[in-house]
Image (cartoon, rainbow, N blue to C red):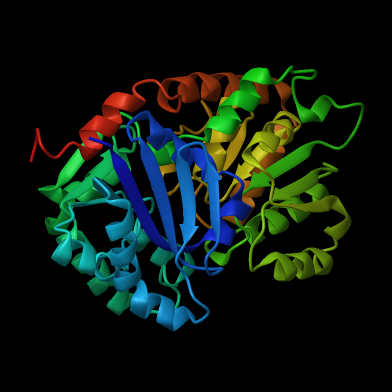
């Protein structure tokens, strides 16, 4: 029987493409004959294909109508492609968008969370959906876990295991697998990395140029990119003429440019926009440090490229990265400590070398595609285990 995956969410297709690492979903081809990733918001009718994976927008012009009609549109689409498995990372609206699938297709929904909502609330003061009050969003999240047939997380993310094991709606449905596809960079990234010929060890040694501080990800409020601009000001005040390169697009680009102008660091920041996953390796390889206020795949890509990392110690980072061993960490929102950790690394090449070496070892163990096939089987094979 042909195995077909339907992965659905309420994101915009164009936003995901702008991230530059959207094609990590092709790793699902290790288990499925066809993979459809459906976006219920964004540009209407857009479709992008690579290999056996197709990204499809089912959106219309109205955001509210997109949400209202999402269950019907998803149901119609499923009737056409005949999925054998269903997956979502959406914790807020999955109860609604999958309603017709569950009622009429008897779909077994796999929910794979990629963030801890309560941490986002504490860090940003906003709900994940932004349009909802936090109290209502908590209700929706409970409903989404109630509708899901299985909840999946990775064995390396101890904070997620503890969180999901503590919730009534998820603990009995929890499946812990060796590798999550969401943890892996795209196949294009791995190909580019294997083909890369390293001409210099790190950006700090590039012909006397200022060391490169790199961020890769969406320029959205919840990513806390503004913290990096404040940190750059402090780093420069400490006597380090660094350059900050921001790879990615998003709704906060103009406000971040204004903040950089206000702080007097605009000439030291380069907004390069979104890049293809295959183009990212050269940015990582040119960086002295990767700065991670809240990043997932990009941090893992940096680790696989051997770039030392300064990060906020939150979400999945907690318990995996260790301060002073394979990264330099600061508590969430502590801009001063974050900047001081970057200053510490910039002033100590031997420390950067140690951090990069230890982080690369960790990345090879945790974020390479080894064991992907068995992990996908464990995630989606409902017939052998409840």
Along the viewing direction, whichever of 178 and 195 lies nearer the viewer = 195
Residue at 33% over, 35% down: 32
Q: Say if residue 294 shows up in the picture.
A: yes
Q: Residue at the right extreme?
A: 208
Q: Quadrant of the C terminus?
A: top left
Along the viewing direction, whichever of 204 and 89 lies nearer the viewer = 89
Please indicate whether residue 52 sits to the left or right of residue 166 in the image: right
Q: Quadrant of the N terminus?
A: top left
Residue at 36% over, 51% down: 7
Image vertical order of residue 301 relative to residue 224, above or below: above
Along the viewing direction, whichever of 336 and 142 lies nearer the viewer = 142
- Counting every numbered tag in the picture gives 0
Please indicate whether residue 152 sits to the left or right of residue 259 in the image: left
x and y percentages locating residue 106 in the rendered image:
14, 58
Image vertical order of residue 367 relative to residue 79, above or below: above
Picture quadrant where residue 191 is located: top right
x and y percentages locating residue 254 in the rendered image:
74, 69
Please indicate whether residue 379 sits to the left or right of residue 368 in the image: left
Residue at 42% over, 76% down: 66
x and y percentages locating residue 37 in the rendered image:
42, 52
Image vertical order of residue 324 relative to residue 88, above or below: above
x and y percentages locating residue 357 in the rendered image:
58, 19
Image vertical order of residue 88 relative to residue 288, above or below: below
Residue at 50% over, 18% down: 361
Along the viewing direction, whichever of 49 and 287 lies nearer the viewer = 49
Q: Say if residue 306 shows up in the picture.
A: no
Picture quadrant where residue 208 is located: top right
């Amino acid at each position: 029987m042909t195995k077909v995956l339907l992965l659905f969410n309420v994101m915009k297709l164009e936003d995901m493409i702008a991230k530059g690492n959207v094609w990590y979903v092709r790793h699902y081809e290790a288990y499925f004959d066809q993979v459809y990733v459906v976006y219920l918001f964004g540009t209407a009718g857009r479709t992008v294909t690579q290999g056996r994976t197709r990204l499809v927008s089912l959106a219309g012009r109205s955001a509210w109508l997109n949400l209202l009609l999402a269950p019907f549109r998803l149901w119609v689409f499923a009737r056409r492609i005949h999925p054998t498995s269903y997956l979502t990372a959406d914790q807020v609206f999955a109860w609604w968008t999958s309603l017709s699938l569950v009622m009429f297709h008897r779909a077994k929904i796999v929910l794979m969370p990629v963030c801890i909502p309560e941490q986002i609330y504490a860090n940003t003061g906003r709900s994940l959906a932004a349009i909802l009050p936090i109290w209502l969003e908590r209700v929706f999240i409970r409903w989404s876990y109630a509708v899901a047939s299985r909840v999946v997380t990775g064995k390396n993310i101890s904070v997620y295991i503890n969180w999901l094991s503590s919730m009534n709606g998820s603990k009995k449905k929890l499946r812990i697998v060796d590798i999550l596809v969401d943890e892996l960079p795209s196949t294009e990234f791995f190909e580019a990395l294997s083909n890369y010929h390293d001409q210099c060890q790190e950006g700090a040694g590039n012909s006397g140029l200022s060391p490169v501080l790199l961020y890769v990800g969406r320029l959205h409020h919840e990513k806390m990119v503004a913290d990096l601009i404040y940190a750059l000001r402090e780093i420069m005040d400490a006597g380090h003429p660094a350059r900050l390169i921001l790879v990615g697009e998003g709704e906060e680009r103009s406000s971040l440019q204004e903040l950089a102008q206000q702080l007097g660091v605009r000439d030291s920041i380069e907004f390069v926009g979104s890049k293809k996953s295959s183009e990212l390796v050269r940015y990582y390889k040119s960086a002295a440090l990767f700065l991670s206020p809240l990043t997932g795949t990009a941090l893992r890509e940096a680790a696989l490229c051997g770039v030392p990392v300064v990060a906020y110690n939150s979400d999945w980072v907690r318990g995996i990265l260790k301060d002073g061993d394979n990264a330099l960490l600061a508590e969430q929102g502590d801009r001063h400590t974050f900047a001081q950790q970057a200053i510490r690394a910039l002033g100590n090449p031997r420390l950067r070398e140690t951090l990069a070496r230890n982080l690369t070892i960790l990345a090879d163990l945790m974020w390479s595609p080894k064991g992907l096939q068995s992990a996908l089987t464990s995630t989606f094979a409902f017939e052998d285990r409840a």
